[in-house]
Amino acid sequence: MVLTMRWIPSGGVRWLALVVAVLVAVLAWRWMAPTRVDAVQLRQSPLLRTLQFSARVKTPARVDLGATLTARVARVRVDEGDAFRAGDALIELEPEEPRAALLQAEASLQQARARLDSQRALSLPTAESGLAQADANLQAAERDLARTRDLVAQQFYSQQKLDEAQRAVDVARAQRNAARAQTQANGQRGAERANAQAQFEAARAAVEAARARLAQHTIRAPGPGRVLVRSVEPGQIVQAGKALLAVSVQGPLELQAQVDERFLAQLQPGQRARVLADAYPDRPFEARVDRIAPSVDAQSGSVEVTLVVGEDKPASRPDFLREDMTLSVEVLTGERSKAMVLPLRALRADGSVLVAEDGRAVAREPKLGLRTLSEVEVLGGLREGEAVIADATVVPGARVRAHLLAADAAGRVPGKASTGNQAGAAGQAISQGFSR
């Protein structure tokens, strides 16, 4: 191999050195120049946190209605599929015997009432009049005894006359005591009054019992609902306890959902919810969280949540809901009318953020509050108007040049939202359902 060496003129060396110097200067400038990073400016805006999940319409209560006694069916007022209201007569049993018993009890009650009225109006005044007369007779007998005693002392009357006057006083006193006892017995708290009152109360209780037995001959609806199965015909003799009608009784319209236990802390009774039926996407309606099951399903790791619809305004209940219909529910679990909002993608793994300050990325540890799928509330550690770097890969101390992202009309910064509160494709489907 033959090596050939060429001589570079001195002017060429100077040009080469100049080129190398320029390249070094460019590289140094690019190394020391600040990096352009996306940033968001902290501002006050409303913040809502919602939890989305699927639910189903709860099946209404099924009730079997029957008789409480043995009787013959006189009339059946409903058929399968018929709707009824609370208190409507559904089945009528032959009422002749209990109706006659009621008439007899009412007659006894009238007698007891007349007896009590008579005791109040006649017996007491008569007893009081008899007591007054007995007092007068006793006073007259005592005066006659005093006169007889004086005359016997003067030997005008014999001792036998005095004994007769004494016996007359004793008889008058006994009559006075009997009249007083009779007056007390007919008084407000006397035995006669108590006996008459007790008879009246017993007769009135007998009337109520007879009415209750007559009412048992009419089987009424326990609430609004619909007949599912009819197992009785007129003329049939029915036994106590045998089911004659199977009905679906309407109660509060309830929705049941199985929610992942991770979100249990966000739910509580009374929270408002927006509900959308998959079959009727253009007819959303309101609901309220009514109760949360006290236990968690060990197999699925979910908790049962029950919501009610139209509790205060039954007329506002949707008429298109059917048993076991699939629904999409969005519960408002947190709300701030005015808060400093930060995108979740600006948070670093340790919970800190980087702020563009004097051309450098400065680390801060903010105090955070309400958290949503894509944003979080800042309670402290940052000031309103500061530029927070939205790129979590920037290292603290790096030279940066903040490029503020424009916020939309709702005060939110466009970008990819975090997925921390929702369960995969189901959550996306629910979100799409609500956005229609």
Image (spheres, rainbow, N blue to C red):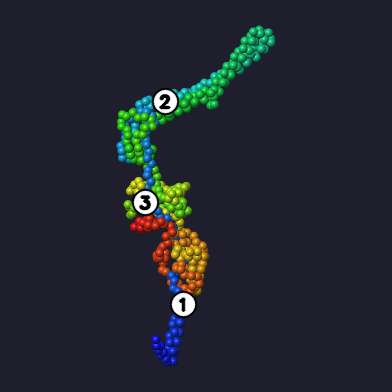
Q: Earlier in the sequence, mark 2 or mark 1?
A: 1
Q: Which residue is mark 3?
A: 327
Question: What residue do we see at 49% from left, 60% from top?
Answer: 369
* Quadrant of the image occupied by residue 45: bottom left
Provide the residue designation for mark 1.
31
Side of 409 relative to 122 (left or right): left
Q: Helix or strand or loop: what does disc 2 sit on?
A: helix
- The residue drawn where x is 37% and y is 28% is 70
Rendered-image quadrant of the C terminus: bottom left
Label 3 neighbourhood size at 10 Å, few (<14), some (14-19), many (20+)?
Answer: many
Q: Are marks 3 and 2 in contact (CB under 8 Å)?
A: no
Q: Nearer the viewer, mark 1 or mark 3?
A: 1
Frontmost of labels 3 and 2 is 3
Left or right for 319, reference 30: left
Q: Specify the amino acid type for callout 2.
A: Ala
Can I make out residue 424 in this image? yes
The front one of 301 and 98 is 301
| Amino acid type shown at disc 3 | Leu
Q: Which mark is residue 105?
A: 2
Q: Is residue 206 above or below residue 280?
A: above
Spatial CA distance of label 3 from label 2 is 57 Å
Q: Residue at x 39, y 86 (%)?
A: 1
| Mark 1 residue crowding within 10 angstroms, few (<14) / some (14–19) / many (20+) | few
Give the residue drawn at x 44%, y 89%. Answer: 14
Mark 1 element type: helix
* Label tally: 3
